[in-house]
Image (tube, grey):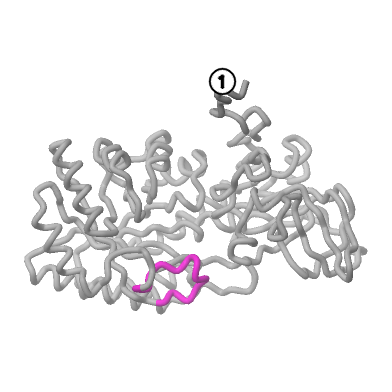
Amino acid sequence: MHDFKYRERDLYCEDVLIQDIAEEVGTPFYLYSYNTLRNHFLVFDEAFKDIPHMICFAMKANSNLSILKTFIREGGGLDIVSGGELYRALLVGADPRKIVYAGVGKTKEEIRYALESDILMFNVESPQELFLIDEVAEELDCKARVALRVNPDIDPMTHPYISTGLKTHKFGININNALKEYKLAESLEYIEIVGIHKHIGSQIVQISPFVDALEKIIFLAKSLKEAGINIKSLNVGGGLGITYKDETPPHPRDLAAEIIPLLSDTDHTIIFEPGRVIVGNAGILVTKVLYTKLGEGKSFLIVDAGMNDMIRPCLYNSYHEILPLRENSTSRKIVADVVGPICESGDFFAKDRVISELKRDQLIAVMSAGAYGFTMSSNYNSRPRVPEVLVKGKEFFIIRQRENYEDLVKGEEIPEFLL
């Protein structure tokens, strides 16, 4: 559920007319519902209230400071994948002991920063990374808490670019080698083993892959215990999908009903890393029709947002519902591509979409844009990045200002020989 609804013929976010926001901030812009963000977090948290657990929101889905603060205020932790995300997390007051650090390419400087910040744990992806963490911990004379990321070789049945749990993927340690790698970790003086981590992919709309992967890591945890290696936590990752078009992903309660019984004879704290399921449907991208164009047997709606603002349709051929900010029951339906101003044929939000006929300057909402929207945006074609706006009740707040042309060249310098 989300809080973007039509009242009569106008689209609202909570109790704010979206047209009013557009008139003040201009287009394009990202818009989020505070009520939806908070409710989604609390629903996920409540689903697992019967077991010891921690919700660490996956920052890669949406790292705006105000979004992060929303979850931190509810007791949430954060799943990070870079030093920059750690900086953002600490800036908004995240508890370092609720931060887990994943990612296959942590640098020595990032590892040092995380150790000095006393984060909860690293999700270690390879033996070489493990050695480097041990080396940096020795330099700092501290223990580095780690969970090894285990690749369970489970097909999450999602888009191949966001599938991470097969043995052919770059992520994690092959589960068949896990016991050996844990023994290696145990031998390192500055490493403290605290858990097991797995994450098999994103936008997963079936429960069975979660169950299959969890069964494998529970078996691994028992094998570790038999080998004298006791862990405190099982990090089961994230990946629960949302509805973009006609998907019917399980509710967090459904997921809980299936996996909690598997954990009945364990005493581990379960760590979850949800991202898209919390923020995906809590945000939209608002854009304006610049031109309508009848091509060779095809119609185009050219809007002022582009693939630099939201790359998911180009990258994944993903579906996003497109709604007018003001419904017109008399407008006819057309088949059109909704495209942006970028000089790429991949610059589109929809192809061959049945959509209400729109005119110049009309506004549309690209739905389900709260996850991997702004975080994947860029300045391609030297386009300033768009603002982000948060609605709470009857008020709205600009939580990121629109960039200007001066921002585009910040940090650039021309050497003297060119002057």
What residue lies at 71% left-to-right and 56% top-to-bottom? 344
User: Dividing the image into 4 quarters, which one contains the C terminus?
Assistant: top right
Residue 146 percent location from the top left of the image? 22, 53
Which contiguous range is marked in magenta?
155-167
Find out whether residue 158 is within the magenta segment: yes
Residue 268 percent location from the top left of the image? 21, 62
Residue count near mark 1 (Cα–Cα under 10 Å), binned few <14, some 14–19, many ≥20? few
What residue lies at 59% left-to-right and 61% top-to-bottom? 315
What residue lies at 29% left-to-right and 55% top-to-bottom? 123
Q: Amino acid at mark 1?
A: Glu
Query: Up-down: is 91 above or below 46?
Result: above
What residue lies at 55% left-to-right and 24% top-to-bottom? 415
Q: Is residue 209 left or right of residue 152?
A: right
Asked whether 338 or 217 is in front, the reply is 338
Find out whether residue 108 is within the magenta segment: no
Residue 25 percent location from the top left of the image? 72, 36
Please give the count of numbered marks on the rendered protein.
1
Q: Is residue 318 left or right of residue 328?
A: left
Q: Main secondary structure of the magenta part?
A: loop
Asked whether 343 or 276 is in front, the reply is 343
The answer to whether residue 173 shows anywhere in this view is yes
The answer to whether residue 236 shows anywhere in this view is no
Going by the picture, which residue comes out furthest to the right? 330
According to the picture, the residue beneath numbered tag 1 turns out to be: 416
Query: Up-down: is 185 above or below 242?
Result: above
